[in-house]
Image (spheres, rainbow, N blue to C red):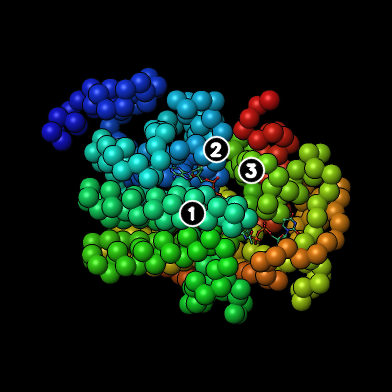
Amino acid sequence: MLSTLYKFPFAFAIVYYGVIPLGYLTKWWTTDDKMKGNSTILVTGGAGYVGSHTVVELLNNNYSVIAIDNLVNCYSNGQNEKPESLKRVEKITGETVTFYNVDIRDREALDKIFKLHKIDSVIHFAALKAVGESVQIPLTYYQNNIAGSSTLFEVMAKNGVKSLVFSSSATVYGNPQFLPITEEHPTGQGCTNPYGKTKYFVEEILKDVCASDADWKVVLLRYFNPVGAHESGLIGEDPSGVPNNLMPYISQVAVGRREKLTVFGSDYRTPDGTGVRDYIHISDLAVGHLKALEKMLDPSFASWKAYNLGTGRGYSVLEMVKAFAEASGKQIKYELAARREGDVAACYADATLAKNELNWTATRDIKDMCKDTWKWQKTNPKGFQKS
Ligand SMILES: NC(=O)c1ccc[n+]([C@@H]2O[C@H](COP(=O)([O-])OP(=O)(O)OC[C@H]3O[C@@H](n4cnc5c(N)ncnc54)[C@H](O)[C@@H]3O)[C@@H](O)[C@H]2O)c1
Ligand SMILES: CC(=O)N[C@H]1[C@@H](OP(=O)(O)OP(=O)(O)OC[C@H]2O[C@@H](n3ccc(=O)[nH]c3=O)[C@H](O)[C@@H]2O)O[C@H](CO)[C@H](O)[C@@H]1O
């Protein structure tokens, strides 16, 4: 049966998927994943903010990419349309992205993809990520992020694919007990919201999976605060509704979509009283995933390992406002307000381990982060949706 599948992927696709946009079939029919130099990577949540930027780096580095996404948090012209972010990725790279509108909780659909393609590794981004929303609808978050991840891992194991990079977050460290935060910092204890807990729980699941089967290789990447956009200005962060995070809020003030920024807290024990974070350019973050894939090919790499991805340098809210005003030439109106519940005063990484073991270090500074965000925002004031 399997050999038939590989010989006749076209027919298989029609039988199992019914109506599929012709482009995808053409891709299956004409492109042998192995024709490219590097390996084939399944990217879950590939149409999202971090996913799309990582797909650019993968394609630029000769990997073949199979992207899946259920479109819950990305813009598409229709259920059978490739998401706009991935169309833009194709424009940037000149390469085609194979895309499936699939939910990671859909075991059968996932299994078919693993059987259609010879997948070498998985980069797992797909998740719901709004902290406030996760407090309102925790079961949805546990179902999507934990049950979804566990289904994905089961399908991977069944198909003999046991190499994974997981999108984790500095949120697993909770309220920092020391700064800068190293990977040795305790995790899980201070996770105060369901979203943060899902990151911690999935990390724990993966550690157990590695302990049970020595064939698994897992890299947990703990992101600090990803910001910025691809230097082309073609892809970037596209939050729906009012942005929760600082950088997209500032850029929407600059472009005139919002009147002013509310600065949450000016009485923290930080140099100017506002919260300090380790902002990292999204393209640097994306490169970190390629370094993680390379690391897992090292014969000495076994089981799992966690790495911080940050710059190691913290910036306050007011420093970010100033840097963005300089990059955009726009005045950023703001007002000082009370602290936001759940916020910590300061959080920044010790990224030495990633430097030493992944040969990765952030290369873009705060000016690049603001310049690229502004380029994306001013050329796409409404994000990917054109009108
Ligand atoms: N952006 C950040 O600030 C940040 C920080 C730390 C960690 N992370 C993690 O990085 C990953 C990517 O984040 P992002 O900022 O790109 O978010 P995003 O929402 O832009 O991308 C996630 C993508 O996953 C898709 N998705 C969600 N649930 C799915 C499901 N069940 N099946 C298939 N697709 C699904 C969404 O449609 C979306 O396109 C997430 O796991 C997130 O928790 C993000
Ligand atoms: C509690 C919370 O949401 N945590 C998430 C948020 O971390 P952070 O809270 O670190 O990121 P953020 O961008 O929401 O906030 C950064 C800093 O800006 C401040 N700020 C933010 C928005 C605003 O309108 N005004 C303002 O002053 C905020 O108080 C903090 O000091 O985002 C991260 C990704 O980037 C992770 O997803 C975290 O889990």
In the image, taking residue 336 as reference, residue 72 lies left or right, namely left
Q: Quadrant of the C terminus?
A: top right
Q: Are the two marked residues, 2 and 1, in contact with CB atoms closer than 8 angstroms?
A: no
Q: Quadrant of ligand 2?
A: bottom right
Q: Which mark is residue 139?
A: 1
At 49% from the left and 45% from the top, the residue drawn is 51
* Mark with earlier residue (2, 3): 2
- Farthest-out residue, bottom: 178
**Secondary structure of residue under mark 1:** helix
Position of 275 relative to 27 (above/below): below
Position of 33 relative to 124 (above/below): above
At 71% from the left and 45% from the top, the residue drawn is 242
Q: Nearer the viewer, residue 3 or 17?
A: 17
Near mark 2 (Cα within 10 A), the count class, few <14, some 14-19 or many ≥20, is: many
Ligand 1 within 8 angstroms of badge 2 C-beta: yes
Asked whether the viewer can see residue 281, the reply is no
Q: Nearer the viewer, residue 247 or 16?
A: 16
Q: CA distance from mark 1 to mark 3?
A: 22 Å
Picture coordinates of residue 103 (x, y %)?
A: 40, 40
Camera-nearest label, 1 or 3? 1
At 35% from the left and 41% from the top, the residue drawn is 106
* Mark with earlier residue (2, 1): 2
In the image, taking residue 216 as reference, residue 250 lies left or right, namely right
Q: Which residue is under mark 3?
A: 239
Q: Quadrant of the N terminus?
A: top left
Q: Which residue is under mark 2?
A: 74
